[in-house]
Image: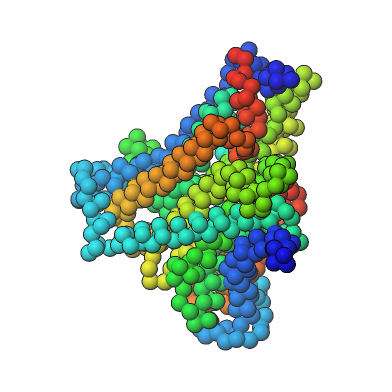
Amino acid sequence: MPTSSFFARYSAYLQAAPLTLVLLVFLVGPLIVILIFSVFKFTGFIWEPGFVIENYERIFTDRFPVTIKNYVQTIKITAITWAITLFIGFTLSYFFVFDLIRFKIKIFFFLLVIVPFWTSGVVRMVSWLPILGREGLVNKVVVGVGLSEQPWDFLFLSEFSVIVGYVHVFSLFMVAPLFNVMARIDPSLFEAARDQGAKGWQILLYIIIPMTKPGIAIGTIFVVALVASDSTISRILSGGKMGTISTTISNQYQHFQYPFAAANGIIFLIVLLLFVGGLMRVVNVREQL
Amino acid sequence: MSDATVVQNGGHATAKKEKGRGTGFYVRATFFFAFLFFLYGPIVVMGILSFQGPTGGMTFPMRGFSLHWFREVFNPSYIGEFTSPFFLSIGLAVVVMVITTVLSFLAGLAYRRGFKGSGIVFYLTVASLVTPSFLISIGIGLGFSNLGLQTNAWTGGLGAQLTWTLPFGLLIMLAIFSRLDTSIEEMARDLGATDWQRLQHVVIPIVLPGLIAVALFGFTLSYDEFPRTALLVGSNNTLPVEMLAVQSIAPRPNLYAVGTMTTIFSLAVITISFVALWLVEKRRGLTGGGGVPEAEHYGDALGQRRKQAGPPAE
């Protein structure tokens, strides 16, 4: 039958089509819209269709100091969050994989860390107020014990609370891939290394870390992309004081400066995709699935 | 052979036993429990504060102990109307879950057979995961308004959420399918099974745990999503967007009460998923059917081998 052979022949294409179509309409489409808007003429108040490169030009000329400041702030916050989540992810995975012996306990402890991933990020964000706020638990202790006469204001609506929020919400994205790759390391390698006279730190440096690199790469992609492109958590937990590139773009959008927001967004997307693409050249993500 | 495995895999553990638990172990165990405290502490504190007395505030001390703020959640005259956002979020989450599960499963099947352009679709999926959420929502918003359309949760919102849930769905399906032995399907074909029969009686039962996982991701990621949805919901807020709005306008303990309720709801959804997974595994154990071992979902092939080999010699 011709129809059935058609389906048999192209079934893989038909099966992949719906997902591809959704991504084309809701990912590629919107990005093209942004690309188009980024070259529209814009006076600061009204925009009209056209093709100008001034929206890009100003990013590198008049606004260059601001651009640099935005990116420095973004890179700083992202790097700090990345380093903390990497440390947490590595330590916890090591604990789950090599310290815990019973399989059921491993999985149970791992799940305890993963479960909040499936709960509300807004709730987790809001729940820091009673801990870190001016009247919060930490400041009550600080003042009560006499560490300081005034509550510590740097705890909340500050860079500190934003980083705490990021670590709280995003560290799972580092824990899961690291756990995944570390679990595949055969501990008999350690035995072999020890027999050859390797010390504990040498095993860590020459066996565990090299073998967990793919997991580190995947976790890095997640954490960097999520932190660098967040504008909500930073707005709420810094009180709108954070000048990252994504908050700048969001502000421009909310002030109807669409072409400015679009041009900034395109540059930012290119930077981000270059970073992720670079990492994906180093590690084959598909092999890790 | 299996004895050798025990010795090999148990070796690490036995060596440790001989020397006793090292300091490193206790440091890491302490770190783990400290992290749990960090992870759950704020949520527990929020849970306690949601029982604040009527005159109480957003922080300690507790001024009495009441259900006042839980009642205020449903009080329509109060700032923050949570009931209809809650049902909107659930409805949207169910639709996103179904679409994500079906589309990821189909795409997973396609990757199993292989097709031209599969690499491009894979990179598109990764790009969907890392593209800043605000760019997607701004793009969809501008696109809709230029077409003269209003976006709401069911149009732009739904599409934006799918760009977040589909990558997880596809990655999970690829992981599941890469562990699925093709010979089982070939066997079914040799025995005369049609395409549909193979799908229905062989492939789907084997990947069912993966489908449950995709459904769990689809539902929860949609239910809690805010960065991509916030600009696109139009006049009807989803629950996270409504909570964010209330948080910026007038945060009162009713926000904690709604947070507590939605967390309990999420925990119930997670529990149901795990019970479903457990039932699937249990049925498998009874019928003796082969399948993806539980451990493989977590990539813990070693743990699985240990499990089969019994506990290491202690």
Q: Quadrant of the N terminus of chain A?
A: bottom right
The structure residue drawn at horizontal position 49% and vertical position 82%, both measured from the top left corner, is B148
Residue A60 visible, this angle: yes
Left or right relative to B285: residue B3: right
The structure residue drawn at horizontal position 42% and vertical position 54%, both measured from the top left corner, is A122
Left or right relative to B101: residue B88: left
The structure residue drawn at horizontal position 61% and vertical position 64%, both measured from the top left corner, is A18
- Report x, y in % for residue A24: 63, 68
Left or right relative to B94: residue B63: left
- Report x, y in % for residue A264: 61, 70
Is the residue A199 above or below the residue A21 in the image? above
Q: Quadrant of residue B14?
A: top right
Nearest to the observer: residue B210 or residue B55: B210
- Report x, y in % for residue A215: 66, 43
Is the residue B93 above or below the residue A179 in the image? below
The structure's colour scheme is: rainbow
Nearest to the observer: residue B285 or residue B309: B285
Q: Quadrant of residue A48?
A: bottom right
Residue A69 visible, this angle: no
- Report x, y in % for residue B112: 70, 51
The structure residue drawn at horizontal position 48% and vertical position 37%, both measured from the top left corner, is B279
Number of numbered discs on residues: 0
Q: Quadrant of the C terminus of chain A?
A: top right
Nearest to the observer: residue B250 or residue B264: B264
